[in-house]
Every structure is written in structure tokens, then in C-alpha cells.
Amino acid sequence: MPIETTYTHARANLAALWDRVTNDREVVVVKRRGAEPIAMIAADELAGLLETAHLLRSPRNAERLLTALVRARSGEGVPLTVEELRREVGLDT
């Protein structure tokens, strides 16, 4: 669950909230009277969420990824190193 705080509290405690967001991976929702709430989230967490949303946007790709996840969790397949995977898909440099 995200941490909720007021605009006044967030302004007075920005450094501490920033640390919680970046160090503890907390999401902080800041509420301000008469305005829509905003969320503070670490930039790399946001990038990951946006990338995931992009990858799952296509139903075909989402099904492929979820099938791969199920196979991985059940122990199917052979683990590869990043270098082996790069070679396998033709991305070796």
C-alpha cells in the first residue's frame, strides 16, 4: 500500500520522503486540497512499469510472456547466461 501524506507534510519533509521512495521503494501519494493527488515513485520503478505496460499492451505478446513465465516457474527450459542468450538471438557483439 502506498504511503499517503499531505502537501504541507510532503513539502516540510521532502528529503525524508525522497529517501523512502528511493531507498525503501515506497510509493508516496501526496494529497492537496482542491487538486488531484500525485504519486512519488522512483524513476527506475516508473521506467519498469512503463516498459511492462508497453510489453503487455499487445495481447499476443502478453500471452507469449505469461506462457514463458509459467514455463520458467515450473522449471522447464535451460537457464542461459546473458551472453548465451545474446548469441542465441543474434545480438552478440
Image (spheres, rainbow, N blue to C red):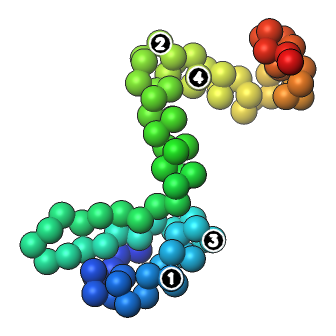
The disc at residue 65 is 4
Above-or-below relation of 21 to 56: below
- Closest to the camera, between mark 4 and mark 3, is 3
Q: Nearer the viewer, residue 60 or 55?
A: 55
Q: Which residue is mark 2?
A: 60
Give the label, 3 or 1, closer to the camera: 1
Vertical placement of residue 79 versus 22, above or below: above
Secondary structure of residue under mark 4: helix
Image point 27% across, 80% down: which residue? Answer: 7
What amino acid type should be assigned to the residue bearing mark 4? Leu
SS type, badge 2: helix
Q: CA distance from mark 4 to mark 3?
A: 29 Å
63 and 80: which one is in front?
80
Where disc 3 sits, the SS reads helix
- Can residue 2 be seen in the rendering of this structure? no
The residues bearing labels 2 and 1 have C-alpha atoms spaced at a distance of 43 Å
Q: Amino acid at mark 1?
A: Ala
Above or below, comparing residue 4 to residue 58 in the picture: below
Label drawn at residue 67 = none
Q: Nearer the viewer, residue 45 or 58?
A: 45
- Res. 23 mark: 3
48 to 29, vertically: above or below: above
The mark that comes first in sequence, 4 or 3, is: 3
User: Percent x, y for residue 59?
Assistant: 42, 17
Q: Are marks 3 and 2 in contact (CB under 8 Å)?
A: no
Give the image location of residue 19, x and y in percent.
57, 77
Q: How many C-alpha atoms fall within 10 Å of the one at disc 4: few (<14), some, or many (≥20)?
A: some
Residue beneath label 1, please? 15
